[in-house]
């Protein structure tokens, strides 16, 4: 068993809470949101037999500009001890399906459990042009550009008793284009997009590098 410590720092954030839900309304002052998590496995504690540690951090922010739209980023990093069991090492947040709902702040073209890391750095970048190009009429698509980058490493491979695993020791790259707000239903809207995987981890079959997405946005 293990002990975990988690903290979240979000200056100026607004939220609505009740007994049944806790809804975050956003950060009007556009400060970064910082999240930190530490984990320590303690042999003999509540029957646990693993001695390990891990640490991870996240920083995210959305910056709305007057003439260029909204730029958003999320940076995630982590490190863990070399003797960490494979099931407890870091998986990249992957969400690949050939055609499915978009999952921001994840690798849209990466397969589930495709990579394992004991050290990682993930960067998710997104720029929405908001109403800058098509205005705010009844049909007002919102172009969105996105790029995701991943770096990883695996220390302590000698502890792993399993078939060969894939490691993100070369940059993982994907970029995409979305058109949000194609169908505006008032409270929510739908759009479409395509994401392409390229660089060192480009797959042999061209079509396997594409993921087609439906984007979902709410009016909150």
Image (tube, rainbow, N blue to C red):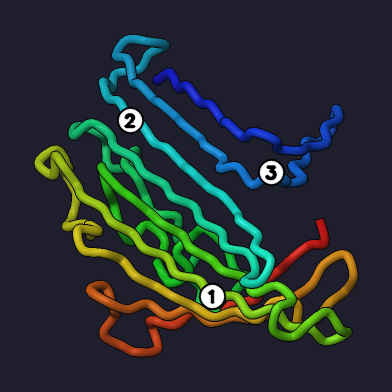
What is the quadrant of residue 21 in the picture?
top right
Viewer-proximal residue among 1 and 167: 167
The crowd level at tag 1 (other Cα within 10 Å; few <14, some 14-19, many 20+) is some
Q: Mark 3 against mark 2, which lies toward the viewer?
A: 3
Give me the C-alpha separation between circle 1 and circle 3: 23 Å
Above or below, 65 relative to 175: above
Assign the N terminus to one quadrant of the image. top left
Q: CA distance from mark 3 to mark 2?
A: 32 Å
| Image vertical order of residue 159 relative to residue 205, above or below | above
Relative to 17, is 155 above or below? below
Residue at 42% x, 11% y is 46
Compared across the picture, whether 156 is left or right of 52 comes to: left
Q: Position of residue 70 (x, y in %)?
A: 63, 64
Which of the 4 quarters of the picture holds residue 65? bottom right
Residue at the image point whose x is 49% and y is 78% from the top? 176
Label drawn at residue 145: 1
Disc with the residue nearer the chain's start (1 vs 2): 2
Instruction: Indicate which disc residue 29 carries.
Output: 3
Numbered disc 2: secondary structure = strand
What residue is pinned by disc 2? 54
Task: Residue 174: give its label.
Answer: none
Instruction: Please give the name of the residue rendered at 53% of the width and 48% of the height, measured from the top-left corner.
Output: 60
- Could you tell me how many numbered marks the image carries? 3
* SS assignment at label 1: strand
């Amino acid at each position: 068993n293990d002990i975990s410590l988690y903290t979240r720092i979000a200056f100026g954030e607004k939220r609505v809470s009740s007994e049944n839900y806790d809804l975050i309304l956003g950060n009007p002052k556009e400060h970064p949101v910082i999240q930190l998590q530490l984990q320590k496995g303690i042999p003999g504690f509540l029957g646990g037999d693993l001695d390990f540690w891990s640490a991870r951090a996240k920083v995210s922010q959305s910056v709305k500009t007057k003439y260029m739209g909204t730029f958003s980023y999320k940076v995630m990093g982590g490190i863990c001890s070399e003797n960490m069991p494979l099931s407890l090492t870091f998986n990249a947040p992957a969400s690949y399906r050939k055609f499915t709902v978009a999952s921001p702040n994840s690798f849209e073209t990466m397969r589930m459990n495709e990579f394992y890391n004991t050290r990682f750095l993930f960067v998710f970048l997104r720029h929405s042009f908001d109403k800058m190009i098509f205005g705010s009429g009844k049909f007002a698509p919102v172009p969105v550009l996105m790029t995701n980058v991943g770096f990883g490493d695996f220390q302590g491979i000698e502890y792993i008793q399993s078939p060969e695993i894939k490691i993100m020791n070369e940059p993982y790259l994907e970029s995409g284009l979305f058109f949000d707000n194609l169908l505006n239903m008032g409270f929510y809207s739908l759009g479409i997009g395509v994401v392409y995987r390229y660089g060192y981890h480009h797959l042999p079959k061209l079509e396997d590098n594409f993921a087609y997405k439906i984007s979902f946005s709410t009016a909150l």
